[in-house]
Amino acid sequence: MDALDFVLKLHSGVRWIVIAVSLIALVWYLLSWQRKVSNEKVDRALISAFSGFIDLQVLIGIIYIVWDGFAKEGFPLFRIAHGLTMIVAAVVAHMSRRWRTAEPQIRARNNAALIVVVLIIVGVGLAFLQLAPSN
């Protein structure tokens, strides 16, 4: 396995961490909102982990797109569209900072909604990969 393959496998592997953190955070915020319970340290840790792993995934993806683009495949439109959509997802993931001082229930509701919106954007970004020509 060469270094470029390693970057692709790393990008593919980190997605599972993103999925796990997303689901854990979503369940936490939905329960916090519904039960009117909050723990500010857990709230901050989960939303930071969520946005941080999204950022890491985007960074690894950018490295792969640029490296592979110059070394092998060029820059096909489906990859550019995928990358740009994922950058949008990362930007949206950081919007939680806008309500970090809100009441706990509002913060929980907004963070749950934010995670759902980011996951929808990620789904759109993944759909662009389906435009890749099959070999």
Image (tube, rainbow, N blue to C red):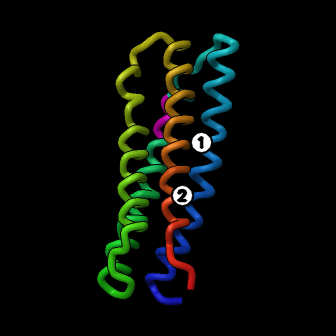
Q: Residue at x 54, y 27 (%)?
A: 113
**Is residue 55 positioned above or below 75 on the image?**
above
Relative to 64, is 112 on the left or the right? right
Relative to 40, is 30 on the left or the right? right
N-terminal of the pair, mark 1 or mark 2, is 1
Which sits in the foreground, 62 or 52?
62
Q: Which residue is drawn at 55% across and 20% down?
A: 108
On the question of residue 129 being in view, the answer is yes
Decide: marks 1, 2 in contact (CB < 8 A)? no
At label 2, which amino acid type do we have? Ala
Relative to 98, is 6 on the left or the right? right
Q: Which residue is drawn at 38% across and 83% down?
A: 73
Q: Label 2, on which residue?
A: 127
The local crowd at label 2, few if under 14, some if 14 to 19, many if 20 or more residues have their Cα within 10 Å, is some
Marks 1 and 2 sit apart, C-alpha to C-alpha, by 19 Å
At label 1, which amino acid type do we have? Ser
Residue 14 x %, y %: 55, 61
Instruction: Name the main secondary structure of what is drawn in magenta.
Output: helix
The reply to whether the magenta stretch includes residue 46 is yes
Quarter the N terminus occupies: bottom right
On the question of residue 49 being in view, the answer is no
Q: How many marks?
A: 2
Residue 4 x %, y %: 44, 82
Residue 27 x %, y %: 68, 31
Residue 55 x %, y %: 41, 51
Q: Which is in the foreground here, disc 1 or disc 2?
A: 2
Magenta residue span: 44-48
The reply to whether the magenta stretch includes residue 109 is no
For label 2, the SS is helix
Q: Which mark is residue 22?
A: 1
Q: Residue at x 51, y 65 (%)?
A: 129
The local crowd at label 1, few if under 14, some if 14 to 19, many if 20 or more residues have their Cα within 10 Å, is many
